[in-house]
Image (cartoon, helix red, strand yellow):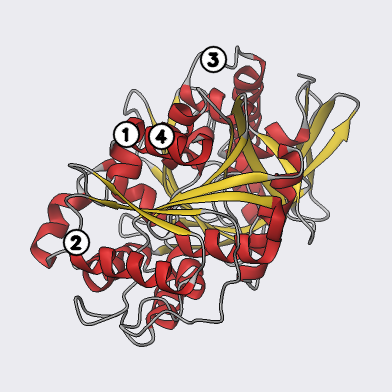
Amino acid sequence: MSPDGIVVDRSANTLHISRTYPAAAERVWRAWTDAEAITRWWGPEGWAATVYEMDVRPGGRWRFEIAPADASAVPVRSIATYTTVVDHRELAYDDVFADAAWQPDGSGTFPTSVTFTSAGNGCTVSVAARFPDGQALQRAVELQMADGYAEALDRLGNLLDGPSSTSEGETLMSELSTVTSADGTTIAYKKTGSGPAVIVISNVAEDHTGVAGVAEALSKDFTVISFDRRGRGASGDPQPYDPAREIDDIAALIEVAGGSTALASGSGGCGLTLDAASALGDKVTGLYLYEPPFIVDDSRSPAPAGYVEHQEALVAAGRRSEAVEYFMTEMIGVPAEYLPAMKQDPSWEAMVKYAHTYAYDGQIMRGLQDGRPLPADRWSIETPIAVAVGGNGEAFIRAGAGALAAILPNVTVLTLADQDHSAFWMAPEPVAEQVRAFLLG
């Protein structure tokens, strides 16, 4: 890490801080845009960061708190709203200090830009924090804000220099490769195992780590690619969202796999999997779908009218936790009295982080959860398809599996004994064994 410098530009009321790291721009970018990774270095030495929200896209928010480990000072809370996001090149955000209720404290807005410039085998990070006037800049200098930034960037250097296997956060920053999709968006992926290729497609509100169990189980017999879908993890999220671009992402990953691959997914990811198989033809050698949540009759209530628009409105208003509540109660059917206990589990914050993806998958699943027959003209797929239903699964899931078998020519409906809807995540070995038997005969 090169120390570079700190410049106080009083003519422009701006602080400039830069550092050069012996790490690729993709890895340094990950350190700035992954909520778990940034908690390991953000803030001055001796301070700890907690990230409550990190939605890295224009209009998205980064909401965090930093506090000294020895409790020698009160916590500092900030809300940054992203204005520019260019993968691996530039972040810009408007930063405001917040009170205990997460309301702006009235001290003003501080536009900040961060650029990532490749430098040989490394990357130079340049931070420019702009202040509304000279008085605000002087106050920042007196509060040693530049020194705090410098210490944080030093901590980032220590993280990047450390062994990639010493902690979960460092592993997150080093284990992923990237591919560029047709529209220029960066898609992060993990490739493991050997043998015939399988791409595992994650569900709503999860990144590639959500399917880590089944990916690991499959890697004993397959070359497995799991990836961060758009708007998740280290992958980009250009706006407006378009479901067709997710098919382009899978096409790019198929090239990584060697030009052809099977696809596997569970629950809400099954709609995208079918769409991709239909669009990509003989590049897809087989499909395994675990409990696609199609609603094709009156065996359960359909998706609420205006579901996608309501989710988009909640996220736009910053009511991300409410968006998760809406999904849980209105789509999944979780009783409202269960929500307080669910919110105590760490998985709730992970879902809040990806709350915007409920609307994304809602767009993909339109017409598949309305309580009406599946559209006969949406998919044209000749490749073999396994649709698995848990032996303890719900009746509407089995009805949906039968409906898919009725409209496509090469569908086999399987039962995974003694399992329910969670098996794709909670029972990866039995799922992998079923995938193995179907794809390898």
The answer to which image quadrant residue 100 occupies is bottom left
Residue 186, image x and y in percent?
A: 72, 49
Residue 313, image x and y in percent?
A: 43, 79
Sequence-wise first label, 2 or 4: 2
Residue 52, image x and y in percent?
A: 39, 49
Which three-letter amino acid code belongs to the residue tagged 1? Pro
Which three-letter amino acid code belongs to the residue tagged 2? Glu
Task: State yes or no: discs 2 and 1 in contact (Cβ < 8 Å).
Answer: no
Please give left or right for residue 79 compared with residue 156 in the image. Answer: left
Task: State yes or no: discs 1 and 4 in contact (Cβ < 8 Å).
Answer: yes
Sequence-wise first label, 4 or 3: 3
| Vertical placement of residue 78 versus 152, above or below | below
Number of residues whose C-alpha sits closer than 10 Å to that of mark 4, classed few (under 14), some (14–19) or many (20 or more):
many
Sequence-wise first label, 2 or 1: 2
Gap between marks 2 and 1 measured at Cα: 19 Å
Tag of residue 432: 4
Residue at mark 3: 165
Residue at mark 1: 430
Gap between marks 4 and 3 measured at Cα: 26 Å
Residue drawn at 59 percent across, 23 percent down: 155
Residue at mark 2: 394
Gap between marks 1 and 4 measured at Cα: 5 Å
